[in-house]
Amino acid sequence: GTTSNLPVIEKILSRTNLFTEVGGGIRDLQTAEKYLTLGVDRVILGTAAVENPAFVQEAVAAYGDKIAVGVDLKDGYVAVKGWTEKSNLDAVTFCRDMRGLGVKTLIVTDISKDGAMQGTNHDLYRKLQAKFPDLQIVASGGVSSMEDVTRLADTGLYGAIIGKAYYIGAIDLKEACEVVQK
């Protein structure tokens, strides 16, 4: 719930022209505003989106597309508090609720796949894309090969987060970008 990484984020912003987004511990409009005023392109609301939908609505009203919501899924249900607790909200219901509040971008993570290097949950992303073609859905968790990148792109998803696969050299970022631009 604090902005302890603010100095690091300032360095990133001052040294790159990259699109930047920040998530984790953003529980009020003042914190979101602090990041956005600094130059962050988008903030990601997580636990706060589950516990305080009115805050999501207020943030979207104030900042529009600069607000995204993280949909961290554990056994099909939204997880909160750093993935330590499972809520009673299933993925489809929560995504529909967030769309109703004006959220345009959802970063959906299948926790069971994250960092495992065993592939991503293609069925989940195909299902969500079919139900919510008007939302910008970003796949997160388990994107571990160029095959994953290609299959996700073919699904029509807005984007995918490549983490561990990039760090260990399993995915070449330039090649991945070329694949999705086709």
Image: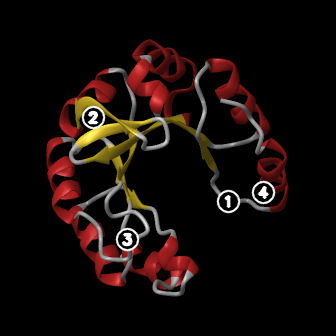
Q: Is residue 114 left or right of residue 93?
A: right
Give the secondary structure at mark 3.
Answer: loop
Task: Indicate the quadrant where residue 117 lies.
Answer: bottom left
With respect to residue 34, does 57 lie above or below?
above
Give the secondary structure at mark 2.
Answer: helix
Task: Identify which amino acid the numbered label 1 is placed on.
Answer: Leu
Residue sitting at 51 percent across and 85 percent down?
A: 172
Q: Are marks 1 and 4 in contact (CB under 8 Å)?
A: yes
Query: What residue sits right under mark 2 in the picture?
Result: 95
Sooner in the amino-acid sequence: mark 1 or mark 3: 1
Q: Are marks 4 and 3 in contact (CB under 8 Å)?
A: no
Asked if residue 83 can be seen in this view, the reply is yes
Q: Are marks 1 and 3 in contact (CB under 8 Å)?
A: no
Q: Is residue 151 left or right of residue 41?
A: left
Q: Are marks 2 and 3 in contact (CB under 8 Å)?
A: no
Sooner in the amino-acid sequence: mark 4 or mark 3: 4
Q: Position of residue 98 (x, y in %)?
A: 33, 28
Checking the image for residue 143, the label placed there is 3
With respect to residue 171, does 72 lie above or below?
above
Checking the image for residue 12, the label placed there is 4
Give the secondary structure at mark 4.
Answer: helix
Nearer the camera: disc 2 or disc 1: 2
Task: Identify which amino acid the numbered label 3 is placed on.
Answer: Val
Residue sitting at 60 percent across and 30 percent down?
A: 26
